[in-house]
Amino acid sequence: MINSRIIGTGSYLPEKVITNQDWEKRLDTSDEWITTRTGIKERKWTTAEQATSDLCVEAGKRALAAAKLNPDDIDVLITATITPDHAFPSTSCIIQHRMNMRTIPAFDIAAACTGFLYGLEIARNLIGSGRYKYIMVFGAECLSKITDVQDRSSAVLFGDGAGCAILGPSEDPQRGILSFNWHSDGSLGKLLIQPGGGSRNPASHETVDKRMHTIQMLGNETYKHAVSKMGQAAVDALNAAGLTGKDVDVFIPHQANLRIMQSTAKRAKVALEKVYITVDKYGNMSAATVPIAMDDAVKDGTLKPGSILLLDAFGGGLTWAAAVIRW
Ligand code: UT7
C-alpha cells in the first residue's frame, strides 16, 4: 500500500474571544474552577452570521497554500463535524463549491471529537489504494451554536474553529502515517449526546423547550472513559509502530481537558513537556481541536520534518482513535 503523509495544514479561528470572566458574569462559576478543572482560560466563538463552512473555506485556503497546491489538485474532500451548516447538503459539498473545486467526491463524517482522526484513516486508505492522490480533511465545529448556555457543567468547555490537513502520497516510506487504530462503543452513546433534531426526536416546540438541541454530557463518566480509552489507543498505536512513549517528540491529544491529556500522557509514558496544549486558549472544539493544534505546532516550529507525532482523540459515540506519524 502506498503510504501517505500530511503535506500541508491550515486553520482558522473566529475573532470573538469568550473569557472565563465572561462566564463568571453569566453563570454560577469562577475562573478558578474552570482553570483548575479543565485548563481552559478562553475560547473563540463565531458570530450569529458565521457557520462551519465559513471557517473551513479560510482554513482550506491556508492548507492549500502550505501544500503549494491549487483547488483543482484535490481528489477527495472530507469534513469531520457535528455542527454542519445544515443536516444536508453536506458541509463538504458547500466547501467544494465555495473553493471552486472539480466535481470530486465530498462527504461529511460524524464521529464527534474523533472525527478528524477517522477522516485521516479514510484518506490514508484511499491514497493507499493508488486511486487518489491529494485528499483534504477538515475538522471543524461551531460548538457555540449547540451549547446550552444555562448549563454551567458544559457551557464553559466549548469553542469554535476549523483545521485542515492535506494528505498526499509519501515518496519516503519512512515518513508519514506509521500506525493507526480506531474504535467505537455505541452502548455508551448517551454519555455525550445532542438528543433533539434527528429522526428520533424531530425538531418541535417541545424539543426546543426541553433544550434538546444542545450538547448534553455526563462529564464525570465521560472523563473516566476518555482517560482509559485514549491511554490504551496511544499505547496500541506506539506498539504497532514499534515505538515507545520515549520516542514521541510531540503529543497532540484531543483537547477536552488538561487533566485528561496529562493522564493519557502518563499512561502512554510520554513526558508531560511533549504534550502540545491549546485547550487554554481555544477550549474544546471537538473535531477541530487536533488539526488546529497540528497547524499551530507547524507554525511555531514544534513539529519539524522527521518529528515523531502521536495523535489521540476521544468523543461522542463513543469513538476513539490514535495515530503515530513521522512528520
Ligand atoms: O470532548 C470529548 C469528551 N469530553 C470529555 O472528555 C470531557 C470529560 N469530562 C470533563 O472534562 C469533566 O468531567 C468536566 C470538566 C466536565 C467536569 O469536571 P469534574 O471535575 O468531573 O466535575 P464534576 O462534574 O464532578 O462536578 C464537581 C462539582 C459539582 O458540584 P458538587 O456536586 O460537588 O457540589 C458541580 O456542580 O463542580 C460543580 N461544577 C461547577 N462549579 C463551578 C460543575 N461545573 C461547574 C462550573 N463552575 N462551571
Image (cartoon, rainbow, N blue to C red):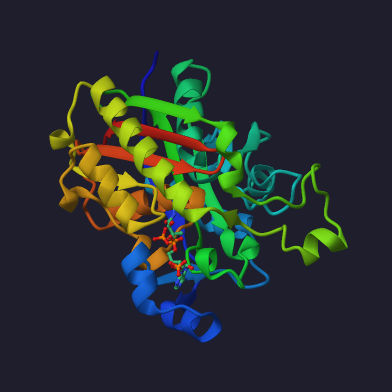
Query: 153 or 315: nearer the eye?
Result: 153
Q: Residue at x 34, y 70 (%)?
A: 35
Q: Is residue 70 left or right of residue 280?
A: right
Give the vertical position of 170 relative to 64 (above or below): above
Residue 112 position in % (x across, y down): 55, 44
Whole-percent x, y for residue 73 in the image: 52, 35
Residue at position x 43%, y 63% in the image: 283
Residue 123 horizontal/vertical position (percent):
49, 29
Instruction: Find residue 292 and report its horizontal and vertical position in percent.
Output: 41, 53
- Determine the residue positioned at 45% across, 33% down: 120
Q: Quadrant of residue 34?
A: bottom left
Please tell me whether residue 184 is drawn above or below residue 201 in the rendered image.
Answer: above
Quarter of the image where ligand 1 sits? bottom left
Residue 317 location, quadrant: top right
Quadrant assignment, res 311: top left
Residue with the most extreme front position = 221
From this viewpoint, which residue is outermost toward the left?
Answer: 246
Q: Is residue 265 visible?
A: yes
